[in-house]
Image (cartoon, rainbow, N blue to C red):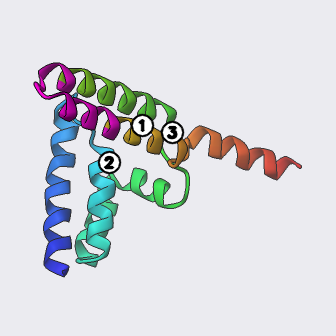
């Protein structure tokens, strides 16, 4: 199983680096998945990922419960909606279109209901320290 986690981490790291270069591919989710996979397979690679200047702080903040920035959520929403529009336009089978739309809806639900928004978490923390 360790080999599967290691392979997954390497693939996600590669996709994350592509996301840094290509404007339409998100980088952060792939690096988060890579860190998760490396935590189960290679502490050395996990530490290497955490030490990367552009990647490590995002992973550490997410792990600390700070979630992701609002701007990132908006960007992810735009990418998901555009992907859904393109996919449903290109897919010839109605059932496939409905499946893609359902999966996109689950993805959007997860981003907005399960992943904290960093600005909200920080504001809530500031309010709890004031009172």
- Chain part drawn in magenta: 87-103
Is disc 1 surrounded by few (<14), some (14 to 19) or many (20+) residues within 10 Å?
some
Residue drawn at 19 percent across, 80 percent down: 2
Q: Mark 1 points at which residue?
A: 108
Splitting the image into 4 quarters, where does residue 118 fall?
Answer: top right
Q: Is residue 62 left or right of residue 102?
A: right
Q: Mark 2 points at which residue?
A: 29
Q: Does the magenta stretch include residue 121?
A: no
Q: Closer to the N terminus: mark 2 or mark 3? A: 2
Q: Residue 91 carries which label?
A: none
Q: Closer to the N terminus: mark 1 or mark 2? A: 2
Residue drawn at 17 percent across, 48 percent down: 15
Q: Name the residue under label 3.
A: 112
Secondary structure mainly formed by the magenta segment: helix
Q: Does residue 54 appear anywhere in the picture? A: no
Is disc 2 surrounded by few (<14), some (14 to 19) or many (20+) residues within 10 Å?
some
> Is 46 located above or below residue 119 in the figure?
below
Q: Camera-side residue: 81 or 126?
A: 81
Residue drawn at 42 percent across, 37 percent down: 108
């Amino acid at each position: 199983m360790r080999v599967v986690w290691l392979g997954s981490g390497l693939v996600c790291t590669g996709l994350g680096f592509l996301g840094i270069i290509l404007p339409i591919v998100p980088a952060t989710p792939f690096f988060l998945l890579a860190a998760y996979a490396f935590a189960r397979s290679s502490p050395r690679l996990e530490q290497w990922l955490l030490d990367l200047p552009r990647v490590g702080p995002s992973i550490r903040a997410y792990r600390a419960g700070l979630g992701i920035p609002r701007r990132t959520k908006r960007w992810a929403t735009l990418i998901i909606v555009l992907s859904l529009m393109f996919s449903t336009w290109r897919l010839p089978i109605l059932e496939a279109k409905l499946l893609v739309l359902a999966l996109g809806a689950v993805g959007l639900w997860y981003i907005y209901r399960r992943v904290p928004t960093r600005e909200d978490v920080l504001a809530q923390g500031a309010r709890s320290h004031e009172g």
